[in-house]
Amino acid sequence: MPVSINDRKLSSLYTSYERAAKPLGKEQALEILSHLGDSARWGQVKLADQLKKPGMTTEQQIALAKDGITANEKKDLETILDKGQVPLEAGARAFLEQVLGRTPVQPQPAAITANGISVNANQANGLSGTTKAGASIEAINISTAPGGRLHMDDTMVIGKADANGKFDLAKLTGEQQMREGDLIRMRARYADGTTSDWVTVKASGIEAKDSRNAVVALFRIGMADAGNGKVDVTNINASRQVSEPGAKLQFTNNRTGEKTQVTVTAEGGFPAGFKLNGKAGDSFAISASDGVNNTAFTETVGNVTVPGGTPSNVDLVPDPALHKDELDSAGKPKFNTVRFTGPLFIDGPKADDVRQGQIGDCYFPAALAAIARANPEAITNMVKDNGDGTYTVTFKQKDWATGRSKDVPVKVDGDLYARSYGGALYGHSSNSSDPKKMELWFPLVEKAYAQWKGSYNTIGNGGHVSDVFEDVLGVDASYQSLGYGSPDKAWNQIVANVDAGKAVGAGTYGEDREALYTNSGVYANHAYSILGYEKSGTDRFVILRNPWGESEPAGNGPNDGVFKLKLEDFTKLYQSLYYQN
């Protein structure tokens, strides 16, 4: 039923909103105010222009609108807020609530500045500010970033400064979409490639209150028995965040009940030398607060356990040694094994089952995901459940004397090195991190590969996708250098292999070319699966997958690691193409 609004012009405007059936944002809220606050001094059009004038603060907009609102017009605004059928975005509702005096007007904070960039403190309409003319605005939401595999400088371009150096309406998208209280790390990139200093903005003016608590990456928290009743706590992947800077984490020892709080550093990690009272086998409940949410630390985000103590299982098959990065200074493992008993396959091998873990073997999961797409039966045939808690994975080894491949069976059990929160440390599957539920085919194939080659350290320092094609499929495989051939040659090779049902992969340039990947969503020194190709008019696209199962160029749908690139961008960003002969 349409709402009853007395002001004729406002009623007509609101009817148009009802027909459009779209949520109303700050821009529509200002339109509503221009119809309510018009007076002999300010006509509706003139007032609308003034309310939207660049540089107007929220306080100024509210004061200007209030100056012309009558008692009846206030009732119309109350009707829109309380009975209106068109949804209001949280920021727009909070703004109109302040106009009515239902909530106090929040003072406009001063702009946040750094060398080369100034950012306005209110983000109701997106990020805005000033920098050099024509500069690109780069940003990352470091409140949401800990939940993924982003580094603190893995930015996306969200806007561009005009000829006067002003930028506005700049917004992060997808999983980085900005909410009230989020920390946004920004900088400007100038035409010559240099940048401003970093500036961090706490988002405000978007919603009535900050309701998103600090995100905690439990899977990055490392625990180690330091002896003498102490436990070392570290970020096992120091280049990425455990949580947002300034957040407080509370560790509660579940054995003793002792609570210890720590403040997350500016880099998103723990202070150097951070320790807890405890011993091997102790588990700790972790709570977090961003200073606004969960300040009593009553809600926990999960538990972590100090490796060591009494083993819970008898090892059925000796496990391959850890990567050297997962050993302490005395050469002892920092991680225990946990027995995983989930299904070998759930609905057959699929590319999106595969997730790379805490190991530099991207070439391996990229190859396995490519094989799962092209030839899932090959994987089904290579992994067998022996029915006694062990599995046999059969690889292929070329006999150079005969040119033929021979079978190399490798026996493993379901014991996988695990992080302190219980999930697998190295390769894992996308369906679950629970040891009783996780699909096992990929982590077991990776474990068997490490067993065959010598250790996780042997396979965890880079390699070639084509070598894995040979080791798994028993075929000859090659790679093509994309820097020396034409895009057409690369396209023809991709199309031929995909159409023939063959596995294809690609690798980027090394870290010496890292600048090439700034804001691209593609990573240097990294391997990818090629899942297919696509044509749209004269444009040709390559469909790729990041073996992380996330982190991709912006605007490519869900953050699942799958994305498409124009052929020209593909041949610019990728150095090598791997394929079966």
Image (cartoon, rainbow, N blue to C red):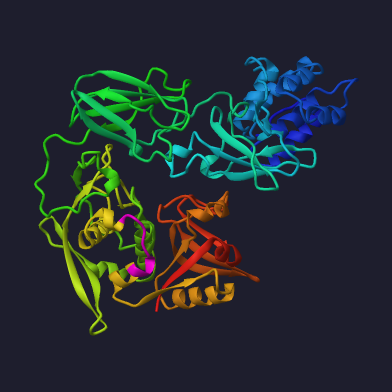
Q: Position of residue 115 (x, y in %)?
A: 66, 31
Instruction: Give the residue drawn at x 56%, y 43%.
Output: 155
Left or right: 150 as drawn, with respect to 96: left
Instruction: Give the residue drawn at x 32%, y 52%.
Output: 429
Please name whichever residue, 269 or 503, is drawn nearer the observer in this view of the structure: 269
Residue 187 figure quarter: top right
Whether residue 165 is situated above or below residue 104 in the rendered picture: below
Dominant secondary structure of the magenta stretch? loop
- Residue 2 seen in this snapshot: no
Q: Position of residue 298 (x, y in %)?
A: 35, 21
Whether residue 186 is situated above or below residue 55 in the rendered picture: below
Please name whichever residue, 295 or 401, is drawn nearer the observer in this view of the structure: 401
Left or right: 230 as drawn, with respect to 87: left
- Residue 559 seen in this snapshot: yes
Q: How many marks?
A: 0
Whether residue 296 is situated above or below residue 524 in the rendered picture: above
Residue 337 figure quarter: top left
Q: Which part of the image, by quadrant, shows the N terminus?
A: top right
Name the residue furthest bottom: 402
Q: Position of residue 325 (x, y in %)?
A: 30, 45
Left or right: 65 as drawn, with respect to 240: right
Q: For residue 214: magenta?
A: no
Instruction: Give the residue drawn at x 31%, y 72%.
Output: 470
Please name whichever residue, 62 or 419, is drawn nearer the observer in this view of the structure: 419
Q: Which part of the image, by quadrant, shows the C terminus?
A: bottom left
Please name whichever residue, 415 or 100, is drawn nearer the observer in this view of the structure: 415
Q: Position of residue 163 (x, y in %)?
A: 80, 42
> Which stretch appears magenta?
460-467
